[in-house]
Structures are given as C-alpha cells and as structure tokens.
Amino acid sequence: MKRELEAAAIALLASVAIGSVLIMLYGQSPAHVWWQMIARTFSSEYNVGQVLFKATGLVLTGLGVAIALDAGLFNIGAEGQMVAGLVACACTGTALPAGTPAVIAIPACALAAAAAGGAVGALIGGLRVWRNANEVITSIMLNEIVAAVALAIASRYIFANGTTTGLPIAPGAEMPDLGMAGSAANGALVLALLLAAALWWLRARTTWGQALRTVGADAEAARSVGLGVGRVRVLAMTASGALCGLAAVNFVLGDRHAYEQSAGAGTGFFGLAVALLGRQHPAGIVASALVLGLLTSGGLVVNDLIPKDLTTLLVGVVVLAITCASAFVRRTGG
Amino acid sequence: MTTMIDATLTKRYAGREVLRAATLRVESGSVHALVGENGAGKSTLVKIIAGIVPADGGTLAIAGASRALARWDRRAARAASVGIVQQHGAFAGTLSVVENAVLGSEGGAMLDLAPVARALAKLGDEIGLPVDPWARADRLPLGVAQRAEIVTALYQGAKLLILDEPTAVLAPVEVDGLLATLRRLAKAGTTIVLVTHKLDEVRAVADAVTVLRAGETVARIEAARDRSIASAGDAGTTWPPSLDVRAIARAMVGADVPAGDKIEAPAEVAPVALALAKVGVAGALHDVTLEVRRGELVGIAGVDGNGQRELALAIAGLAAHTGRVRIGARDVTGAAAARRLAAGLAYIPEDRHHGGLVLDASVADNLALGRRDITGAFRIDRARVATFAAERIRELDVRPPDAHAIARALSGGNQQKLVIGRELSRPALSAVVAAQPTRGVDLGAVARIHDQLRAAARAGAGVLVISADLDELLALCHRIFVLLRGRIVGSAVERAALGALMTGASG
Amino acid sequence: MIDFAAAVITGAVPLALAAMCGAITERAGVIDLALEAKLLFGAFAAAAVALATGSPWLGLLGGMAAGMAVALAQLGCALWLYADQVIVGVGLNILALGGTRYLLALLYHEGANSPELQSTFPPIAGNPIVWLAVAAAIAVPLALARTRWGLRLRAAGDRPDALVAVGVAPRRARLAAALVGGALAGAGGAQLSLSVYGFVADMSGGRGYIALAMVILSGWRPGYAALASVGLAIANQLAHKLEMWVDVLIVRELAHLLPYVLTLLVLAIWGSRRPPPASLGKP
C-alpha cells in the first residue's frame, strides 16, 4: 500500500513539474496558473459542480479500466464502450413513453447503457481469449467502428429531424440535478460512488474479486488451483465495458437530457489515467477522478492563460509518470 | 600433463548453500566426468566455471592461471577458451547455426557467413559431428542441435568443453557416437568435462570422475592408466572396467540412509485412490498405467526430463493427455483442473514459482487460494481464513509466522510449505500428486513436508510422489516405479536396483 | 486508374513506414505501441520545420528526428526504468495527441490547423518519402538478414542471453533498432503533413494501431508488413470508390470504417498464426 502511494506521489510531482515547464514555455507563470486553476474553481459553486460532473464520468470509466487491469487486460476501448452506452441510453430514453416513472425509466436507460458497453467489452474479451487477438488493437478499432455506427443510429432514431440534436428523453429518465448553480453535476455522482463502494467490496471481500486478481497476478497459479482463466478474462472485459457504458448516464440522463454527439469525449481515454493513478483501487480511483476532474475543468477555467490541450498532454505525462514510478518503486524495494 | 581446471567453489541460493567448497581438478586433454544426483550441485558448478553464474566464494584456476572470481563472467570464460553446451541449448532459435556462431564476432558491418559456414561444416566432418550450418536452430531436433553447439564451441576456440547432461536427449546409438567423439577430441587435446548421471557412460569414456553430493565433493576417482587396449573408435564394450563403477555409485547416493518412520502399507483390498490407464502426453509420456491405493505412498523415480512434469500436469488436468485417469471412483478423463480438484485431488506442482503460488500475494491469500471451503462461496469469511492460515502456519512452522507477509519474501522451503499446507488440508482428499515436493527446500522443512505427506496417506488418501531424489522416495514410499523416457520401466524398493533402472544401465 | 494507384501509394506510405518501425522495434524485443505518437510528432515536426525554413527536405529531416526522439523516450522508460511497455506506448500516444495540439497553440496560436505550407514535395514520383518507403521495404529485410545490426537485433528479440554471452548488451541492439524504426515512422508522419500542406490536429487517425496489426499479421517481418499496408490501402481506396458509386446512405456513413473492420477481421482470423519474438516485452 505504501509503495503504491509513493508511486502515485512521485507521478503527480513529476507531472506538476513538467506541466510547469510547459506553462513557462507558453509565457505564463506556473505558480500563477496553478493557483488560478484552484482558486477559480473553488471560488465558484458552478465550477466545483463541473469538477464533480467530470469526475463522475471518470470514476465510472476508471473503475471499468481497473477491472480489466485487475485481470491483466488493457481496455483502451473505454471511449468506444462509453459511446455505445450513450447511444443505447439515449435510444431507450427517447423511446420510453412520456409518463414513465423515474423508478423504471432511469434503471431501464442505465441497464441499456451497461448492456451496450458490456457487449463491446465482451467482444474484445472474446477475441482476446479465443482468437488471441491483442486487445489494445481490437479496442481501438472498435472505438472507431462504434463511433460511426453510433452516429448512424443516432441520425436515424435520436436526432430531431435534420438536426444533430438529440430528441429529449422521457422526463422520468432525467437524473436529478445536484443543483450546483446550474452546473452539470447530477445524481449520477451518487451512482458512481455507490458503484465504487460496491466494487471495493467485491474486489477485496469476495471470492470473485480474489479470482479476478489472481488471474491478473499469475495466470499459471490461477490455472493450477482450478480457476478458469479464459472465463474470468471475458467476464472481466464485459464488466469493464459495462461500467464504461454506464458513464453515459452522467452525460445523457444527467446533463443534456438528450443525446449529444461528443458528450463526455475523452472520459474513456482519461479513464486509463484514472485507473493507473488510482492503482486500480476504488478509493484511489475516486481520488484520482477528482484530481483529473480538477485538471480537465481547471484547464477550461484558465483557458485564457494556457490552451486547454495542455490538460490532455498532462494526462499522457501522468500515465507515463505513474507507470515509470511504480516500476521504479517496485525495483528499489519500495 | 597440466591441470586445466583447479577449482574450489561455494555458492548460495536464497540462503541455502548449493555448493560447499566443492572441488574440481581436471587434467588437460582428459575426459572428466562430474556425477551426482539431482540437486547435488553439478550444473551450478560448471555454470560457475563457464562464467554463466557468479560464485559466492572460492578460487578458480584455468589452464594454470588463477582467475579473479569477481570478474569471471561469460565473456571472460570465452576469452579463456571455456566452452559450454547446456541442457536446454543456448542458441537463438530463429537464427541459423552459422548466425549463432558469429554472433558477437561478426567481423564487420556486413555479414560474410559463407566462409564461417564452410569452416563449421569442415570442422564438423573432421570430428565426426556433421552439421548443417544453414539450418535454423529451432528446427533442429535436440540431438542435432546439440551437435551444432559442440561444433560451434570448438570453432570459437574452446580448449575446455563442458557438456551438461548431453545424452539426456539422445537415442542410444547417438550416445555411442557422441562418446566416441568426445574421446577423439580429448585425444586431440581438448579437455572435456562431462556432467552426467549415467554411470555406463562414465565407465565408457571417463579418465577420471568427481562425485558431488549435497554440494560437496565426496570422491575423486581416476581410471587405471592401461587404456592402450582400447582403440580410438570404441566406446564401452571392449574396455576393461578400469573404473570401479560400484564405488562411484556408492559415493553418489551415499551410505544407506536410516529408513525413517515408514508407515504401514495398506491392505491389498484398500480401494483405489488414483488410477492411470495408458496415460500419454504428446512427445513426452507414453502408456503409463499404475494404481495408487488409499493409504499408500507410491513413488515415481527418475532423472528430470523423462516425463515427470507431463505426468503431473496430465493427472492434474493441466495438460491434454490420452488414456484415462480415475480419482477414487470418478473417471475424470477430460475434466478440467477445477473438477479434478473437486473430485478429491490435491496437486503440488514441481515449480512453486510457476503455478504453485502467487508470489506478490500474502501468505494467507496463498493458503486460501482456490479454497472455497475456507473462504466461502461468495463473501470471503475473513475470520475463517485467518484461523485457517494461523493453523497452517503453526502446523508447518512457517517462518516468519506472519499471515500478512508477502510470499515472495519467504525462503524456498517456507514457500513450499504454503503450497503443501494449502493442498494437503483439502477436505475429503482421495489422491495427492506431489511433484518434486522438497526441491530447493532446506532440511528442516523437508522433514515437515514428509510428515505432512505421510499424514495425508494415514488419513486415507493415495499419495503419488514424483521425485528425482531417491532418498526421499526410499524414506516415504511403499512402492517405487521408475520413469525413463516417458515410460514406466520397472519398479524396485532398493537403491541399487533403482539406480540401475534410472540410469538405463540394466537391460 | 492512375489516380487510384496514386491515392493508394499516398495512403500506403505512412502506414507502411509505421508498420516497418513496429516490426523492427518489436523484432528486437520491445513492444511498440507508440506508433501513433511517432506519426503525430513526426507530422508536426515536419510541418513546423518546413514552415520555419521553407524547405520540405528539412521538414522531412525534422520529422525523422522527432520520430527518433519518441523512440528514445520510449526505450528510456522501458529499458532503463523497466516500466510496463504497453502502458508506455499508450501513454506516449495520449501525450502526443495533447502535445501536438498544445504545440499548435504555442507556436501558431491555432486550434486545429497549422498555417499552410508554401512548398512541399510533388506527389508520388518526385516525393522522396515515397522512395524512402520503397527503399526501406527492400533494404530493411535485407539488412535484418545480412548485416551485423540485423543479426544482433534478431538475437536481442529472440534470446538476449545469447548476446550477453558474447559480451554484447541487448540494450544497444534494441536502441539501434528503435532509432532506425523511429526515423522511418517519423518520415511516415512527415508524409502525412507534407502531403496536405500542413499539420492537422489528430491527423494520424489511428494509423499507428492499424500499423501494429499489420506487424502482427506479417509475422513481424518488415517487408511483408509493408506489403500488408499496401493491401490495406488498396482496400481503403476501394471503399472510397464504393462510397462514391453506391448511393445508399448507410454505405456512405460506414464505408470509411473498412480499414478498421478489416484490421479486426485480420486479427481475429489470422492473428495468432505466427508467434512473436520470443523475448518480446522482457527487458
């Protein structure tokens, strides 16, 4: 545990350092920019709400990627799985009759989102286990395929005629606002936190979680004690996809109350950083999601000072830093 | 005659002394055999001399010059003309023989392989080990690949050639050819060190023998000098027995070890715990049929590499096999590992680092691995796991007695105790397959593990112990079979007969 | 017909160069998922240098240097810090996506496009990058088989112990491989930007991952990887034709997916045929 925290700390420090250098290159003072990022965010309820909103999506995709990592698989397709979820969620939402009560509407849409994401995940997992197809490549390919298919479906069933705005979903399916001065923070945050708690419990306290982590740690040992390695891997990828698909709830049911073309873009990719930085532990994931949520919305908040793409760059730096730091810490005994 | 090797070496692995000031003195131009049982330290000794593994202490002199052990690596050894041909081959598989031969000394940016290939072929023909220099290393059958490695080592200028168990992968007629070649090479001035178990080979070619036992040199025996009788091409049949093979064998296996608490053999009518019928694994195991009764301890003896690994994997359901396997009354042929374990099987894999333990998990986690009866079917009963772990730690005297310690930090013996503790405590055990249960384990732990195996048998399980350690089998088992080249070649209960079966010297 | 061939060649070159990079690097034993990053940074550097100097030739050199720089960073993390090679590759790719956009903003205060290049290479016959790709497709397989560099590279990926035994550090052979590969992929990136007179954000479009699939399909053989890339480019162009001829909406919406679907199918059906280099991924 201590080693993991060390690694995360090193990674964060390195990222801040590199980020500062890049800010300087742009002609700004790093201290000023970092401070502004924090100050502007926390001084406004709206901004805090936006951070929570972004973090919600990241918690879900982070949990998804982490489950796959636990089984020794790299789910780079989180983005595609989320898009599949977006479409499924929106289709269900717009198809539901207007009077559907929330207690049916919300779960129905959420389940559709999870199922769609899970299907994509299952496909990736199946190809890996039975055809030995590298899951990184198949994930990326499916990201593109899902994106195009989603657009095709959306233009037929969801978009209002001739536009690219989605039809509104049934009112019953709308996720309640958290009321933070009109920000997008919504009840999906509660869902995300509940899932994080549930996954923590499953992972640490049940035989399922133990089987999952054994397969990821040492597949040979797992096989010797009778665990079905292939089956666990496919199930892990399916669950991973389902969680990433669920992120759709945050954007469709919670924010727009409709389908929007690039809702939540980047949540999938950044989910990888969240999972890695959080060392695959649900508590770490929640923390990292908040940090990255702060970074991404913070990037927007200081958009007048530095380009927001710096955020994406820093996420890449974080990923590299954390993986180098954890390898380093492991080698030096921690 | 100068001394080619004069060494006294000590080596430790994870706290255990694998070599204890073992000595080796080899004269130039001789064929020197290094013998001993599995685990005696022979491979380690020659690997140190070849610079593959560093020594922890001692002295080394090659060709009369003392060598600094601290700086003795593969490169230094090669510079000193030390060549080695190892059991598992050192060639890069996708490269051809000639490419492997020039690696490191290519002589220029562009490769000019043709002259090297010609030289290799010529050398091979000269010494009677023809090679195809253009063949890809991984496409060669093992015996041919080995020939290629020998020729390559000689081409690279080896004046001392070490061969580690070269005949393990050869057919009998190939063995004769190799031995004859080794004699020829020695006569021409190359010093040969032959690591082997097979005493008939030793008798056939060796000028001298060093016997290792438990990391120490216990004997050095020289052949009588009257070899003028033998002709250069003969190897074995017409030689007078100038080496006292019986003395060597006795030195190898030591004086008879006190029997230890053997438990009573079960009655003939005890039900069968484990039955194998014509079990085979492609290429490694053929037609194995045997039965283990409840309460019985049956041993499978044999030198490593004769099918033991495949036998264990087949019984455990981790390798595809022909033939039928029964656990108790249940036919588990075709069933996956999980079902076999559920049918009452316990499997102790031969390599705890590959399939026995999750090294980065805790002691408690490893003890409860796959044990649904302890953890519960879904929610992990942590109290029960903790109690179970504490019980096993106490029962097996695991050190340090900390259920939260990470398995990787434990010594080999203690790690093995975890595997044993987990497997032998399974409820309703019918059969146990233990492969090399005390390999790399210190003596104290060995005793505990043996006690556990006996206890399992007493409690009614049929225990199959697969081991390259004759002492272990003789101390534990009621019956002992010998596995040679994938087949059961016979059974015996006393040392000499077993040794003969294992070395293929009889029949 | 000529147009078709020209389009195929233009499309194939970046893919083939990236695929050859992947084949070389992985054959030496290092997992190379950072092809996207090499293409992107190569494209950006080529455009930036060409804009600054007015010379597409210097731009090409800049692109190749950028590719080599990414390769160096990758090897540093993988072989000196022993970080997980898959994650390093993906991390570099994310970094490249954000980094090139950031550089766009930094240097040109633009969001998605660099300023337009004044001069660039003529297409196909006068384009040195095309000739580079062709030359590499012939020279690299030959070099692997017949030079010291190639031999040590293959040994490093197959059995690094064999190199250690003869006193050659596997790292050196792998570094040499990665640098050559990086230069090639960087050139591929240069082709992307130089051929459209400037850098466009995210212009690598997943080619790096498709190239890796070509590497796996070709059994880690650079010559065949280049050929496979040409095959994919042909399929891609055919899809475009299909898009234009067939006036069905769904076809037009989905036709551009052909390269991705093909890659998926190729991996699913033939992916596991040839084994990767024996020591792939082990530092």
Image (cartoon, grey):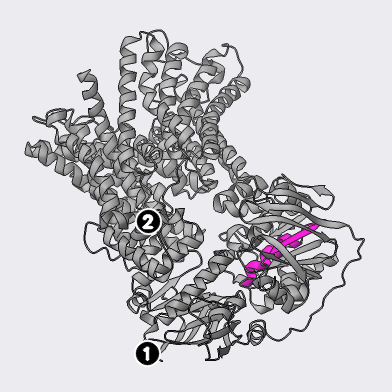
Q: Quadrant of the N terminus of chain B?
A: bottom left
Which element carries disc 2, helix, strand or loop? loop
The chain that hosts pointer 2 is: B
The residue mark sitting in front, 2 or 1, is 2
User: Image check: A274 left or right of C184?
Assistant: right
Question: In the image, is residue B426 part of the stretch drawn in magenta?
Answer: yes
Residue B223 occupies which quadrant of the picture? bottom right
Q: Quadrant of the C terminus of chain B?
A: bottom right
Residue B345 can be seen in this image: yes
User: Image check: B489 left or right of A312?
Assistant: right
Residue underneath mark 2:
B96
- What's under tag 2, amino acid-wise? Ser
Which element carries disc 1, helix, strand or loop? loop
User: Image check: C233 left or right of B304?
Assistant: left
Write down the region rendered in magenta: B413-435
Q: Residues within 10 Å of mark 2 (few under 14, many from 20)?
A: some
- What's under tag 1, amino acid-wise? Gly
Observer-nearest residue: C260 or B306? B306
Residue underneath mark 1:
B64
- Rendered view: B135 above or below B437: above
Question: In the image, is residue C147 part of the stretch drawn in magenta?
Answer: no
Observer-nearest residue: A26 or B55? B55
